[in-house]
Image (cartoon, rainbow, N blue to C red):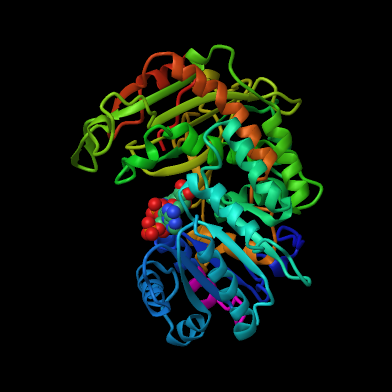
Amino acid sequence: MSSSNPLRDPADRRLPRIAGPSGLVIFGVTGDLSRKKLMPAVYDLANRGLLPPGFSLVGFARREWEHEDFAAEVHDAVKEHARTPFREEVWQQLIQGMRFVQGTFDDDESFERLRSTIEELDKAQGTGGNFAFYLSVPPSAFPVVIKQLKKHGLADQDNGSWRRAVIEKPFGHDLKSAEELNSTVEEVFAPDQVFRIDHYLGKETVQNILALRFANQMFEPIWNRSFVDHVQITMAEDIGIGGRAGYYDGIGAARDVIQNHLLQLMALTAMEEPASFDADALAAEKTKVLGAVKLPQDLGKDTVRGQYAAGWQGGEKAIGYLQEDGIDPQSKTDTYAAIKVEVDNRRWAGVPFYLRTGKRLGRRVTEIAVVFQRAPHSPFDHTATEELGQNAIVIRVQPDEGITVRFGSKVPGTSMEIRDVSMDFAYGESFTESSPEAYERLILDVLLGDSNLFPRTEEVELSWRILDPIEQYWDTHGKPAQYPSGTWGPVEADEMLERDGRSWRRP
Ligand SMILES: NC(=O)c1ccc[n+]([C@@H]2O[C@H](COP(=O)([O-])OP(=O)(O)OC[C@H]3O[C@@H](n4cnc5c(N)ncnc54)[C@H](OP(=O)(O)O)[C@@H]3O)[C@@H](O)[C@H]2O)c1
């Protein structure tokens, strides 16, 4: 397995690696994710010269399409959503390897057709038997597709070829279902053949957490309980559930976002330096953090869930969650969730990590704020120590990618008045190249067999172990608190931090 080290090799900083002979099969190719993200990402990779000349793309879906209909669909998706400009010569090369297999997941004949399509591509395109199977399908279909791949010999790695499975989130809806899914997957694929997508890990800014911490000398000495007061990790959306009622209701914000994205961000923020940047070393450190997470004693006080009510969003009237199409008016699904956890180890003992996510909040923003303790003493006459602000390092994951350092500075004038100021690093200003889309990076990594950015079985199960007691508590205690659309969540969440003498950031 490849284990390149982008932090150490200056020649290897941004997607410089090129995939060898290979192909990608997308199950659920007519779906939303495939059209908006996967097909455009494949084109962008091809356009940047990162795919092999005979790269093949096989779509599998129910509708009665010919190869040409599929190619036309990919063409439209690329024109609409690709990040890089459309180039006819790249497109002409890409369609040589495009095939469509019509079928349903429970139909053996469809999978036999898929097998012969792959064999044909091996001959025509030189794919060498190397195929990744991307399961962009409803979670309930994961087991049947995995079993069909085994039954039809599609998971077999013959004559030095490789076969890999790419699985979208959600990976289970609690610990038990995640364990069941893991055992189904592991009956068919070895751990190094399985790539679980948490697309946040494909974002440049998320990988930059490691660069910030471990490629610099000035941050790590203060990155611990002696200096850090608390950490806030926020993923806020300004939109509601849109047309995704069927997926969202009964799942909710904590399962949809905290279990995967936020706990992964927390693990990267809190983990020790890995022995190297390879997949095993990285997973080992993240796993230790997730295993050391301690839940609050009083889940009623230190967790909050909410549901958006009617309100105003971006100058327009917005309806509440319970009035959305397809939502049960009695639904107790959380559209906002905030939890406080600790990482029970020597570095972090006593430092709360506050994680929150929600829909229809004030702004779309994802950030990690490491907030430092106040200066222990102030020699300045007019600024009492408790009036000084708290220093903070804020990693802005999206949309305005960068890092902000907040500290106190003297206000110009004759008195020694101190006020908080910010120092900013913005990706867009420091680098001329734009960041690749997360899915570009992750699909390329799958083709290269580089699993650094994919959560493993243990991480997924540990994350559910953290969330399960919270979900069980919520199931048996009342209802989510209502918050008006366009605000920063329920007042209960503000009170949760106020009790600790702290407050949420308003990004
Ligand atoms: N959309 C997102 O932004 C997003 C983000 C994160 C994760 N995900 C995850 O990614 C996966 C796909 O999401 P999506 O939004 O693209 O879903 P979607 O729009 O509902 O698409 C599902 C796809 O599966 C196909 N399908 C369903 N049942 C089938 C069957 N029995 N046989 C053959 N094909 C079948 C559908 O084909 P037909 O067209 O023939 O019905 C469609 O192509 C899900 O696991 C989702 O949770 C999505």
Rendered view: 489 above or below 91: above
Q: Where is residue 474 in the image (x, y as percent from the top left)?
A: 46, 19
Could you tell me how many numbered marks the image carries? Answer: 0
The residue located at (43%, 13%) in the rendering is 477
Q: Where is residue 469 in the image (x, y as percent from the top left)?
A: 56, 21
Span colored in magenta: 42-54
Foreground residue among 379 and 358: 358
The residue located at (74%, 25%) in the rendering is 345
The residue located at (51%, 28%) in the rendering is 389
- Give the position of the C terminus as an image quadrant: top left
In the picture, residue 461 is in which quadrant? top right
Q: Where is residue 442 in the image (x, y as percent from the top left)?
A: 58, 59
Horizontal side of 70 relative to 185 (left or right) equals: left
Horizontal side of 77 relative to 370 (left or right) equals: left
Foreground residue among 370 and 91: 91
Q: Is residue 319 shown in magenta?
A: no
Rendered view: 31 above or below 83: above
Q: Where is residue 402 in the image (x, y as percent from the top left)?
A: 52, 51
Foreground residue among 494 and 87: 87
The residue located at (68%, 75%) in the rendering is 20
Foreground residue among 103 and 500: 103
In the picture, residue 74 is in which quadrant? bottom left
Rendered view: 93 above or below 458: below
Q: Can residue 137 be seen in this view?
A: yes
Q: Is residue 46 shown in magenta?
A: yes
